[in-house]
Amino acid sequence: MGRSGPGRIIAIVVSLLITAAVSAILWYWFHESAFLGADFMSTFEPASENAQRIQDIYVLIFWLAGAVFVGVLALTLIFSFMFREKEGVEAKQIHGNSRLEVLWTFIPVIIVVVMAVPTFNTIIDLEADAPDDALEVVARGYQWWFEFEIPELGVVTANEVHIPVDRPVNFRLESADVIHSFWVPRLMGKKDMVPGHVNQIWFTPHEVGEFRGQCAEFCGLSHANMRFRVHVDSAADFDTWVAAQTADAATSEDEAILAGMQQFTQSGCIGCHTVRGNDLAAGVAGPDLTHVASRGTIASGTLANTPEDMERWLSDPPAVKPGSLMPNLNLSDEEIDRLMAYLDSLQ
Amino acid sequence: MATAVGTAGQVTERSGIWEWMTTVDHKKIAILYGITSFFFFVVGGIEALLVRTQLAVPNGTVIDADLYNQLFTTHALTMIFLAVMPLGVSFFNYFIPLQIGARDVAFPRLNMLSYWVYLIGAVMLTASFFLGGAPDGGWFGYAPLSDRAYSPGSQMDFYVISLIILGISSLIGALNFAVTIINMRAPGMSMMRLPVYMWMTLITAFLLILSLPVLTVGLIELYFDRNFGTHFFAPEMGGDPILWQHIFWIFGHPEVYILILPSMGVISEVIPVMSRKPLFGYAAVVFAGAAIGVLGFGVWSHHMFTTGLGTVPQVVFSASTMAIGIPTGIKIFNWLGTMYGGNIRFNTAMYFAVSFLVLFTIGGISGVMHASPSVDSHQQDSYFVVAHIHYVLFGGAVMGMFSGMFYWFPKITGRFLDETSGKISFWLMFIGMNATFFPMHFLGISGMPRRIYTYEEGLGWDTWNFVATVGAFILALGVLFFIVNFFQTMRKPRTAPADPWGGSTLEWATTSPPPDHNFDVVPEVRDRDPLWYNRDHGISLPARPEHLHIHLPPPSYFPMIVAMGIGLIGVGLLSHLALSFVGVAVLIYGIWGWSLEPTS
């Protein structure tokens, strides 16, 4: 391949083919990773209006970036093939070209302006205060779990929160210890939970379903195990959930449950956990367990709320979540069974 | 060089090791820097391989959460402060005097002090693994996680103290380099005739001088918070964790350019020489580099877009960050323009340099994506950013450094690294790095947060994590090939001529390796590409005078003593404060002896 005649054409064609192939493969993989389905954490499948706004910019910038990549790759390849060392060829001794310099200063300038204008518009809209009718939810980060509180409805829960569809929700983000970050990729971009600050993030979900979230700011030993769920419910389902959550824990005459309740006191669980309706259980260091059985997951979204996983958790919490504040209480199998009977009653 | 006395060719009776320990010759110091930093490059690589092995499959059990957090923290610290920065310093040391036509740097003994202090800081940071655990709070050490309440052990103290010590080393080096480049240029070498590599070095030196003190202030405040009960960053006592982030990133963002500008300088040498034509748009490349340096101080808050800065700061820092893409783009176009119309010799150095263009572009455009706070709210702290920084720092900085190693190896050792083996290591590294880091874009897009030691299966992350781990081992194999190549080459005879590539800058005017005094006669510079000008105008270098009498600075062990003093102060701050006072005494003794040391 060379710099004149057919050699030049071959160099250009081969370079463009390689560029096209590389770009096509990468695009395919990007596409596969972006569109995963409802149960995943894709940043490219928005389920709220605000996330859709972000998505619109993301797509625009993605294509601009892709165009730059294709251009640079193609030119690098073409020049590499076309100007390979050849006997008897002299390199052109050019020192520069002012017109070209001006031209290729303007190329990035234009790209940047095309990115900047819609970005600034979006920031101004998304950073604005939430609409007045927004539902206010307090999300509080702890090492390593999330507490959710809906003050106007009197709901307190952990690691799983329900919100109504098609109504703006404003999350007030707080932290009890170190910096965490609140991220439900399909519902919204992330925002940090900074101790001493109150951040807000709001969005209007338009799709019913269960959405996975995860802490996105490194927050210590079990950062990887700090996961949560946001359930977007229809208005009716949401009201049902609120009614159930605001009720006190059911009392029971069942012997197994009463024995479990006693075990809950004896093992010291009451020191850290609140169970409304059980006057002894008023601890605040750990998650509110009043309706723990109604949740789909336990241990900050790392385990399913099944008997097997609950047993695994109770028998050695730090083995599941290293550094967890809840110690290994060295519970016997019988004690675990009793506790599980009680916890299972907390619907 | 007012203090430089002593005679070239002076016979020394000291042992080899003592000679290396007391040398003030910039070339020897450069080799010390080079070997030490490459050693730590391997250490950082092993840390990365352990991290990747843990993440190969979901719910991995190779290492536990605690060790994982130590490893990802020290991987970053090692690669940034112990490997890539000092590797750059190694090249600065070797080639500043040679490219500007000087006999040494401005302050030869300070140069050696800078090496010793670096070594002490590096050993201290790495030793922490065996002394209660390595730092585990991330290389960014965000408060309050890094505060005593949440990091009770000595791990984050090791972080603070070793970074302060490493900062002292870098600061000394940067001042030395800036003074040398400004004051010691050969006759005729005006600033606009400075090789581009020298320009990038000068800009890097100023970035270090301006950014490191900020980090040091932050680190001292963190140390006080941890040990003396102050509350700079503790929110419950009126401190603010966001303050730490501002301080850290005012240093941290220029630091990115500190890592990448030296490699931009290297490829600005390699691409023209291998293309056999002058750099396209010299002035544009130089001013773009300077613009990157200046703008680099105005973009730090883009690391903090998710902390709740509010609308105005987001818009301002978004605009400044996007603006930095403009000079970067200009540079890429000028390098491509340099290749255009050339007669390009594709050796290993050029392979690495050309790969820089594409790989750095990938890192550059993903960087511009983060400049949009909306997009960044998804990408921040996800694997997308991990992909981005590795395209910039590996695809850019490290590939550029490898280009420099192949380019300058014959000058430094008089031997050519094997080209076949070199190309094998290039392809292994190129394929390996793309297989490791490109999939991280996909992982980020599918929502995988970074800095997690484990992840659930079935979230679409399994395949790409496995691919990335395989890629990391391919990459490591490429580096291994290079190491074997190095040792085999060092056993071969010295066959490299003074100017094997037809270079344009002054280092190619002297022998390979250069004599202690660099140049028999300091050449006069008549053009931006002095050797090509001389070649084209039939000017031959002045012959070696019959009686060569050149004053060179004598070796000194006082830099070592001063460094020991600094090290002891550091050890005292980590263990028992009394030891720090001993350190101060040693330091004062060292400075005293240094000032009164006879200069001949």
Image (tube, rainbow, N blue to C red):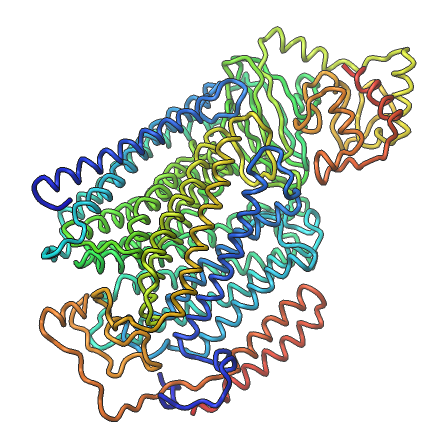
Along the line of sight, the residue nearer the viewer: A170 or B569: B569
Q: In this view, does B109 lie above or below B463?
A: below
Establish if A307 lies above or below B556: above
Residue B364, horizontal then vertical, whole percent: 35, 43
Q: In this view, does B562 lie to the left or right of A337?
A: left
Quarter of the image where one finds residue B87: bottom left
Residue B329, position in %: x, y?
27, 45
Q: In this view, does B398 lie above or below B205?
A: above
Task: Say which of B524 and B409 sits in front.
Answer: B409
Q: Which residue is drawn at 81% across and 15% down?
A: A345
Quarter of the image where one finds residue B506? bottom left
Residue drawn 40% across the image and 41% down it: B434
Q: Front-most of B417 and B177?
A: B417
Q: Position of residue B600 (x, y in %)?
A: 43, 92
**Which of B101 and A26 lies nearest the eye of the viewer?**
A26
**Where residue A338 sits in the image (x, y, percent)?**
87, 21
* Camera sees residue B217: yes
Q: In which quarter of the image is residue B348?
A: bottom left
